[in-house]
Image (cartoon, helix red, strand yellow):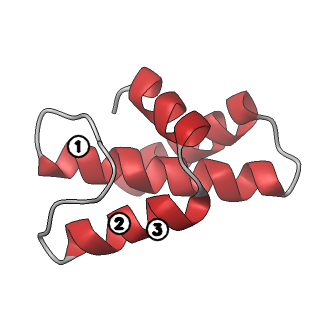
Amino acid sequence: MQIPVIKKLVEHYSLVQLKDAEAAMMEEQKPAIEVEGKDEGECLTHVLASIYIKEKMEQGTPFNQALRDFSQRVRNSIS
């Protein structure tokens, strides 16, 4: 998970565009937006993180807090 990539996605794409990218990736298709990552799994993680963060930001949560919340969610799912 690369924070600069997630930040770029959040800043440059709408929630609709990100959700469309997620749907394309889940269907093993190339998304319409550019998503950086070393493999398909990392790219999907970047998109999912961006969606989560954008949704939180729409509720008034600052970017940094939304990112921390997502990171905590990931850590909890791993342990």
- Identify the residue under disc 2: 22
User: Disc 1 marks which residue?
Assistant: 42
Residue at 13% in and 33% down = 38
The residue at which mark 3 appears reads as 19
Residue 28: tell me if it is visible: yes
Q: Is residue 70 rendered to the left or right of residue 62?
A: left
Q: Residue furthest top?
A: 4
Q: In which quarter of the image is residue 37?
A: top left
Q: How far apart are marks 3 and 1 (CA)?
A: 16 Å
Which amino acid type is shown beneath numbered disc 3?
Lys
Label 3 vs label 1, nearer the camera: 3
Disc 2 marks a residue whose amino acid type is: Glu
Precedes in sequence: disc 3 or disc 1: 3
Amino acid type of the residue that numbered disc 1 sits on in the rendered structure: Glu
| Discs 3, 2 touching: Cβ within 8 Å | yes
- Residue at horizontal 29 percent and vertical 42 percent from the top: 35
Q: Where is residue 20 in the image (x, y as percent from the top left)?
A: 40, 70
Q: Whole-percent x and y of residue 24?
A: 25, 71
Q: Is any atom of residue 79 visible in this view?
A: no
Secondary structure, mark 1, is helix
